[in-house]
């Protein structure tokens, strides 16, 4: 299809699509390397999703070495080799501290601003964008402008914007209220890129049975978790989780979900150890002691010191012991059943919640079609990608934001150094290439 320009095309060396962490970093890097940069973001403020990460505290990276970083990127980690080497977590920390944001390192080498305010991170980036003269436009990219195989700019609601280089950093499809609506995928498809089907990663899980719904709203701390795929243990963790009306959520569950990548092909089961500090002999002594204090009580009333109140009913139901059976009538086998469930509370997982509820998107632009040394498209010169729009995702702990920072930095740097050999914008027609 041929479409006439509006005649009021506004020029820049580089257009960055998306004002999240990858987009802001790309704009900064592009401008620092001499490019005139225009940043397109439809939200009323930049970094909307960034500002809610880590419960508003912003776990912006993980202070680790390359091997540890790659171990925490289960999908296409090796693609990030160059991006990490050019802008690793240490470089990122130096970058923000130079912008006046003091940082601290917490458990698991997770890095946060000392203030515990994500707004300090986004605010520092906005200030740097202003210092560099980056033009921020509140508008949405509607299409790439392509003529005769040459990238010419971006079409927006406010008109055509001319640029020989475009960096797509529009995020995935998680948290759509923050602006992640899949625009980046549509732009990539225009250039002929393959999109690996997006799905949720770091996402709550749906569970079979009624236990979770009965315990809805209950948060458990200091419990252990084991994840089984087709009966084989693939992951374990220790921490906090939450029962919901559909299943389970919370930090430990979100981390576990990143390891569960074959729903529909494989089965998944969770096992929760409610008493990880006690081995079975010690826990059996505890049960004998607790039951000994209440020999004439109903079984269900003898669990008060062992379990949170919301969990007692559904737990007792799973034991198969009549709730009104007297404690002094319990057999050794019944006590063993209680012990087993305290150490191994099973949950059959039926699937993840929708991708819109995920923290990050797994899937996206196929990385085999991207040059890992520059983040440039192998299909359309001058087109670059960064951040969550790429088919790369990681576990929790600051690794996903580090992916955004380092790919954005590399894309901005490479775009600023890119020499465009195509026709300059200003002709009478543009081909909006929609094949894919």
Image: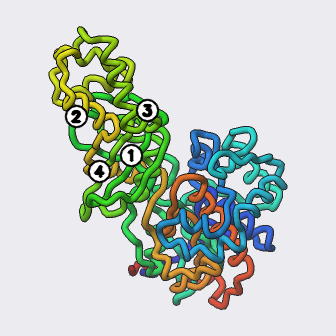
Question: Which residue occupies 40% across, 53% down?
Answer: 257
Front: mark 2 or 3:
3
How many discs mark residues in the rendered view?
A: 4
Q: Earlier in the sequence, mark 1 or mark 4?
A: 1
Q: Which residue is mark 2?
A: 210
Looking at the picture, how far across and down is residue 299, in whole percent?
23, 18
Q: Are marks 2 and 3 in contact (CB under 8 Å)?
A: no
- Evaluate whether residue 411 shows in this view: no
Along the line of sight, the residue nearer the viewer: 270 or 303: 303
Q: CA distance from mark 2 to mark 3?
A: 17 Å
Along the line of sight, the residue nearer the viewer: 279 or 311: 279
Circle 4 sits in a helix, a strand or a loop, which is it?
A: strand
Looking at the picture, how far across and down is residue 204, in whole percent?
39, 46
Q: CA distance from mark 2 to mark 4?
A: 15 Å
Q: Quadrant of residue 168?
A: bottom right
Q: Earlier in the sequence, mark 1 or mark 3?
A: 1
Q: Earlier in the sequence, mark 4 or mark 3?
A: 3
Q: Earlier in the sequence, mark 2 or mark 4?
A: 2
Circle 2 sits in a helix, a strand or a loop, which is it?
A: loop
Circle 1 sits in a helix, a strand or a loop, which is it?
A: loop
Q: Give the residue furthest to the top.
A: 296
Q: Which residue is mark 4?
A: 269
Along the line of sight, the residue nearer the viewer: 233 or 7: 233
Q: Earlier in the sequence, mark 2 or mark 3?
A: 2
Q: Quadrant of residue 163?
A: bottom right
Question: Which residue occupies 25% across, 50% down?
Answer: 350
Q: Which residue is mark 3?
A: 220
Q: Which residue is mark 1?
A: 204
Question: Which residue occupies 43% across, 35% down?
Answer: 278
Q: Quadrant of residue 282?
A: top left
Looking at the picture, how far across and down is residue 359, in whole percent?
48, 50
């Amino acid at each position: 299809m041929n479409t006439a320009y509006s005649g009021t095309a506004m020029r820049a060396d580089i257009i960055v699509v998306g004002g999240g962490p990858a987009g802001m970093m790309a704009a900064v890097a592009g401008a620092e390397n001499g490019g005139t940069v225009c940043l397109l973001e439809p939200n009323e403020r930049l970094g909307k999703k960034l500002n809610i990460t880590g419960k508003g505290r912003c776990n912006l990276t993980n202070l680790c070495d390359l091997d540890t970083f790659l171990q925490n990127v289960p999908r296409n980690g090796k693609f990030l080799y160059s991006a990490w080497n050019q802008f690793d977590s240490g470089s990122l920390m130096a970058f923000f501290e130079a912008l006046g944001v003091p940082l601290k390192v917490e458990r698991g080498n997770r890095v946060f601003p000392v203030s515990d305010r994500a707004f300090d991170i986004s605010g520092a980036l906005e200030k740097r964008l202003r210092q560099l003269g980056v033009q921020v436009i509140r508008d949405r990219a509607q299409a790439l402008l392509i003529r005769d195989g040459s990238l010419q700019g971006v079409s927006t609601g406010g008109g055509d914007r001319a640029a020989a280089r475009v960096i797509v950093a529009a995020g995935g499809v998680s948290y759509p209220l923050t602006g992640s609506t899949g625009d980046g995928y549509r732009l990539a498809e225009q250039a002929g890129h393959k999109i690996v089907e997006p799905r949720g990663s770091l996402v709550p899980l749906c569970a079979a049975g009624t236990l979770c719904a009965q315990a809805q709203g209950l948060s458990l701390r200091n419990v252990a978790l084991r994840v089984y795929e087709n009966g084989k243990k693939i992951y374990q963790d220790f921490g906090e989780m939450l029962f919901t009306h559909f299943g389970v959520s919370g930090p430990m569950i979100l981390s576990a979900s990143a390891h569960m990548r074959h729903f529909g092909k494989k089965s998944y089961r969770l096992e929760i150890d409610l008493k990880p500090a006690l081995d079975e002999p010690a826990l059996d002594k505890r049960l004998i002691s607790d039951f000994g204090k209440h020999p004439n009580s109903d079984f269900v009333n003898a669990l008060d010191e062992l379990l949170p109140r919301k969990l007692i009913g559904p737990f007792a139901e799973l034991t198969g012991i009549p709730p009104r059976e007297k404690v002094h009538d319990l057999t050794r086998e019944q006590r063993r059943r209680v012990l087993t469930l305290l150490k191994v509370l099973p949950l059959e997982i039926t699937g993840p919640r929708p991708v819109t509820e995920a923290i990050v998107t797994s899937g996206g632009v196929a990385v085999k079609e991207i040059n890992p040394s520059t983040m440039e498209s192998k299909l359309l010169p001058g087109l670059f990608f960064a951040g969550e729009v790429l088919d790369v995702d990681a576990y929790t702990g600051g690794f996903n934001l580090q992916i955004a920072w380092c790919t954005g930095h590399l894309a901005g740097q490479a775009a600023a150094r890119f020499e465009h050999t195509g026709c300059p914008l200003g002709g009478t027609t543009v081909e909006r290439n929609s094949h894919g």
